[in-house]
Image (cartoon, grey):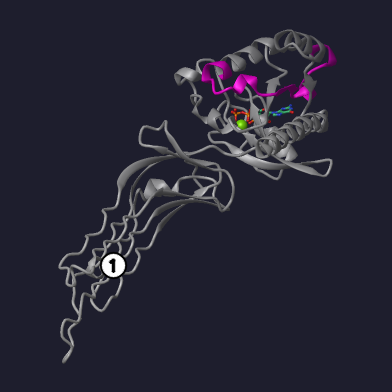
Amino acid sequence: MKFLDEAKVYIASGAGGNGCVSFRREKFIEFGGPNGGDGGKGGDVVVEAVTGLNTLIDYRYQQHFKAQRGGNGMGKDRAGANGKDVVLKVPVGTQVYEEDGETMIADLTEVGERAIISKGGNGGFGNTHFKSSTNRAPRHANSGQPGEERTIRLRLKLIADAGLIGLPNAGKSTFLAAVSAAKPKIADYPFTTLHPQLGVVEVDNREFVLADLPGLIEGAHEGTGLGDRFLGHTERCRVLLHLIDITAEDAGAAYKIVRGELQAYGHGLTDKPEVVALSKADAVTPDVIKSQAAKLKKACKKTPLVLSAQSGEGVQAALRALLKIIEQTREDADKTEAKEAAV
Ligand SMILES: Nc1nc2c(ncn2[C@@H]2O[C@H](COP(=O)(O)OP(=O)(O)OP(=O)(O)O)[C@@H](O)[C@H]2O)c(=O)[nH]1
Ligand SMILES: [Mg+2]
């Protein structure tokens, strides 16, 4: 399935149906009185998060969504039918923005969550409604309110607990493949991964979701390589796993390039907890491991983990380090939620 994480969509809610002007006419009944029914309500435009979707690709093929208009009211006090809603099914993690792309209207983070993006117009009142003691035969009815037409933007920000970042070829996809059932493409050239991919990781009988991302290079924030737009998918991560290729010339320098790009991207990514690890430990001698670890420690100011996704060495330790942070931040989030609820 193709991956698409941004889409522009044109929506229109349904207009309300018109109210009806009608009078009761029956043989031998004089002055039967008004009996025009109300118009039906126009359909809403609704966005709903569903399971089994992980891309917005459908919205490349269909961009116009129109809800049904309400039926007109009719004589004999018959109300018009309400128009059908139109429901845009989107993957969990989709945010809905106004056309400007900055004003967020909805953020759907759970399966089944729905948001009405555009309300249908109300139906107009039929003339029955306007009957009063002074006006027994009103000859007017309201027309239905118009629907609303506008453009919205959908933006998918995947929901993962941990995100894999690093330079191209750092071994990110190999790591994901080693720890989950995901089957990302792996190759010894840069930019093998073009789109984020999720995998479910099991460690110590606990589970978390890990996202593999494309590689970052110097200047990504100016569009070099694949750019840095995909970093949006790490915005919701609780922790980042930063992999640095141990066969690189200088692990410390490699680390700094990626951190510089995270900084330039903004959105608080550099404030996120980070687990730093040297990858491909199987490919070098213990001496090299030592010297690279020392260089990296100087750059990131903590002792990096050392692992090899190929041999499995150090992988469990890395997963445990991630899990610990994920559970800690989950607890903290629960506490703040409880606090907020108590206020
Ligand atoms: N020896 C060794 N090679 C590894 C290890 N992990 C990855 N590699 C190799 O490094 C190369 C790049 O691996 P990928 O997993 O595709 O790297 P990536 O970080 O996902 O790269 P991009 O998607 O291009 O950003 C491949 O040839 C892998 O076989 C490891 O633990 N040991
Ligand atoms: Mg990759």
Looking at the image, residue 201 sits to the left or right of residue 166; the answer is right
Which stretch is magenta? 262-288
Total count of labels: 1
Percent of width and height locating residue 199:
67, 42
Nearer to the camera, 337 or 277: 337
Nearer to the camera, 7 or 45: 45
Looking at the rendered structure, the secondary structure element under dot 1 is loop
Residue drawn at 82 percent across, 33 percent down: 316
Place residue 127 in its image quadrant.
bottom left
Looking at the image, residue 320 sits to the left or right of residue 140; the answer is right
Residue position marked by numbered label 1 in the rendering: 38
The image quadrant where one finds ligand 2 is top right
Amino acid on which the number 1 mark rests in the picture: Asp
Residue drawn at 76 percent across, 31 percent down: 328
Q: Taking 158 as reference, is 164 above or below it?
A: above
Res. 184 visible in picture: no
Res. 225 visible in picture: yes
